[in-house]
Image (spheres, rainbow, N blue to C red):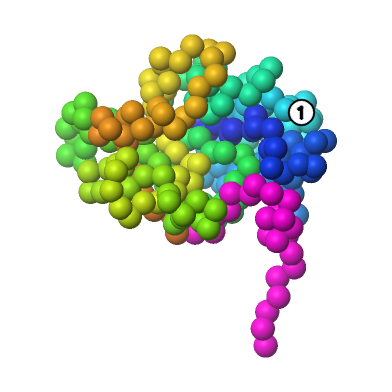
Amino acid sequence: MKAMLLAAGRGERMRPLTDDCPKPLLKVRGRPLIVWHLLNLAKAGITEIIINHAHLGHMIEDALGDGSQFGAQIQYSAEVSALETAGGIAKALPLIGEDPFVVVSADIYIPHFDFKECLNTLEDNDPWGNPHPADQRDIAWLYMVKNPSFHPGGDFAMTLMGLSNEGTPRHTFANVGVYRPEMFASIRPGDYAKLGPLLREYIDAGRVGGELYRGEWHNLGTPDQLQALNAPLTFKR
């Protein structure tokens, strides 16, 4: 399995920190955000990694190199201007290949996620060796988290049949997912395309599953959030 780290965003709400530093290179607890992912992916045996970039992308390449220092092999997909999530993935498909792959937003902090969980998420067959019918959850698998304070309405509902655009309770997409390349085949390389509408389309078709992740997770949007996460830990006596 290969992985793609999404690192092309401008990080507007994180300004002025992102005026001269790509958001994925901001440090959390002594380590750049994107490096947490590289190390955890390599630990799980996922060492072939594609990173897209746009804003200050040369700094990302200079900092990470070929990935060998992290036990990984990195290839880069440069974008003149950010193509949004689905557009960035579509542009990188020649590097990704034909097998399911995991995608992670490089600017989230999820330090204890075990990427081994992703390795067999999208199987061609069910547990008895029978091919999945077309309407099964075979195109994408999303990891969800409890709704943070800044997104109380969540994104999707979880049911026994997979994710749903309707219903409650709703949970928030953690920006970690496993996808089949054909999900993005309709997007022309270089086109600007968001992931949300594409996900909702396949969710309506009954082809997206998901599960709730209960570990530590932060979607860092502002300097204050970053400062709070980097504050020294204190213990009550």
Residue at left offset 80%, top offset 42%: 16
Q: Amino acid at mark 1?
A: Leu
Residue 225 seen in this snapshot: yes
Viewer-closest of 136 and 46: 136
Quarter of image, res 81: top right
Residue 29 lies, in percent from the top left, at 72, 57
Residue at left offset 51%, top offset 56%: 148
Q: Is residue 219 magenta?
A: yes
- The residue range painted magenta reads 215-237
Secondary structure category for the residue under label 1: loop
Residue 102 lies, in percent from the top left, at 47, 35
Residue 48 seen in this snapshot: no
Badge 1 is on which residue? 56
Q: Residues within 10 Å of mark 1 (few under 14, many from 20)?
A: some
| Left or right side of 59 for 124 | left
Residue 200 lies, in percent from the top left, at 36, 33
Residue 206 lies, in percent from the top left, at 25, 34
